Image (cartoon, rainbow, N blue to C red):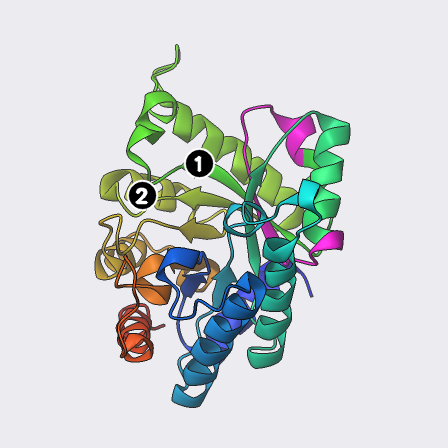
Amino acid sequence: MNYDAKLLESAKTVGNIVCMGLDPQPEVLPFASGDLRADLNSFFQQLFRRMALSGLIPAAFKPNIGYYQSLDRPREEDFSGSQALADLLDMVENFFPGIPVILDSKRGDIARSSLNYAQEAFEAWNADAVTVAPYMGSDSVKPFIDYPEKGVYILNRTSNPGGKDLQNLILGNGSSLYLEVARQIAAYNAKTGSVGAVVGATNPQELKDIASFYRDERVPLLIPGVGSQGGSAPEVMEILRSCGYPIELARINSSSALTHPWKKGPAPEDWLELCEENLRTLIRECAV
């Protein structure tokens, strides 16, 4: 099944377009046994079990690889972070079969190096999709697109404040750089149907402009920035509906607000209830 079909199927199955970011921070975990891998396993096991029992299933999951590999100490032969990510991916597959996993790694390099990164995402980690940086151009993006059943999300207009430094530059033809990137993404997607764009929720007018452009092109959207970054899920849903964008192809991401809304440790005793409440609210706001 191609990636765009997976998006449509998962949205139909669970009735929402939520993407749950899985970016744990050891200092806020409710477990501190000294065995990092075991603590991450316990955390996600309990959280996923509660989600499954409550029927709170998002339409995608997005682990950021840096949150895991930064915990490795390779020169000490310690790969606890990477092993925890492998455990996590197994858990997602077991608890939530059929729900796509987007590996957030924002790779992009010269052609052979990009091929290595594509193999990392799709063969080593067996992710359904990956995030990719566009700056080095088509030969940098092509190795990812060459996996026909996988998804590729290219950074378009990101949610971070510094995104405007380059993405909003006005070119000689009067167009902004992010709109030129959007045109290139649409051209990539026309060939496979599985090339999407990362467009933040923190810039509503720009999101509307881009979603309107992508509407007929049926470019999948990954929309971060909801929750702690200040974006509003109801506002995003209203924007997508108002411009006629095919909503089932979008995924609205929230991370820390769903996995550790207390932000700083130690975790409160009712941590599971806090996570469940926030996830329930977001799923309701992003219902399709």
In the picture, residue 127 is in which quadrant? bottom right
Res 208 seen here = yes
Work out whether residue 144 or residue 96 is closer to the camera in this orientation and state it: 96
Residue 275's quadrant in the figure?
A: bottom left
In this rendering, would 118 be left or right of 70? right
Task: Categorize mark 2 by other alpha carbons within 10 Å: few (<14), some (14-19), many (20+).
Answer: many
Q: In x, y percent, where is residue 184?
A: 54, 31
- Kindly identify which residue carries mark 2: 207
Q: Quadrant of the N terminus?
A: bottom right
Magenta span contains residue 268: no
Magenta range is: 123-141
Is residue 173 shown left or right of residue 226?
Answer: right
Q: Quadrant of the C terminus?
A: bottom left
Is residue 127 on the magenta stretch?
Answer: yes
> Whole-percent x and y of residue 189?
59, 44
Residue placed under numbered mark 1 in the picture? 156
